[in-house]
Image (tube, helix red, strand yellow):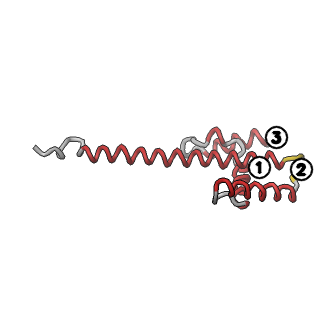
Amino acid sequence: MNHEMTIGGTLFDRVVQILEQARSNVVQSVNTNMIKAYWLIGREIVVELQGGEERAVYGKQVIEMLSRQLTKCYGRGFSATNLKYFRLFFQAYPCRLNVIRHPAGDELACSLKCRATIQPSA
């Protein structure tokens, strides 16, 4: 009897499928958590820079200093440009954190609902 000829594929094939799914889940989880981290970093930058009015010189200094500190601690990926992108990400989606893992196609409804809650009505 050939042990590789089983109804659900070989044991090896089934184990490979389990491992590939686990790897895929890990990648998806890491991506989701990094998106959340970037959004939260952007929020922290916006909160730090909001002193009533946006002070361009102060903001530039804060972002550049934070970039140097993060790069020293964590390495690449935290350039001043990237930190500005994190800030823009938060500003584009200020109430998005709770719906980052929303169903596909739900973007418009969430976006319209969010905009209605943060923009004063005319």
Taking 102 as reference, is 72 above or below it? below
Q: CA distance from mark 1 to mark 3?
A: 27 Å
Nearest-to-viewer mark from 2 and 3: 2
Q: Residue 77 lies in what quarter of the image?
A: bottom right
Percent across and percent down for residue 4 are 18, 46
Check the image and name the residue furthest to the left. Answer: 1
> Is residue 102 shown left or right of residue 18?
right
Q: Earlier in the sequence, mark 2 or mark 3?
A: 2
Mark closer to the observer (1, 2): 1
* Label 1 SS: helix
Which three-letter amino acid code belongs to the residue tagged 1? Ile
| Residue at disc 3, secondary structure | loop
Task: Look at the picture and state if 98 lies above or below 66.
Answer: above
Q: Nearer the viewer, residue 98 or 71?
A: 71
Horizontal side, residue 12 vs residue 46: left or right: left
Q: Give the amino acid type for the residue marked by disc 3 in the picture.
A: Ser
Q: Nearer the viewer, residue 50 or 71?
A: 71
The residue at 84%/47% (across/down) is 50
Tag 2 secondary structure: strand
- Distance from Cα at disc 1 to Cα at disc 2: 14 Å
- Could you say which disc has been placed on residue 20 in the image? none
Residue type (three-letter) at the residue carrying disc 2:
Glu
Q: Earlier in the sequence, mark 1 or mark 3?
A: 1
In screen coordinates, is 32 left or right of 62? left
Q: Identify the residue at horizontal 67%, vertical 47% (top origin).
A: 39
Q: CA distance from mark 2 to mark 3?
A: 22 Å
**Residue at image mark 3:** 121
| Residue bearing mark 1 | 45
Which corner quadrant holds the N terminus?
A: top left
Q: Which residue has dot 2 on it?
A: 53
Disc 3: CA contacts within 10 A as few (<14), some (14-19) or many (>=20):
few
Find out whether the residues at labels 2 and 3 contact each other: C-beta distance under 8 Å: no
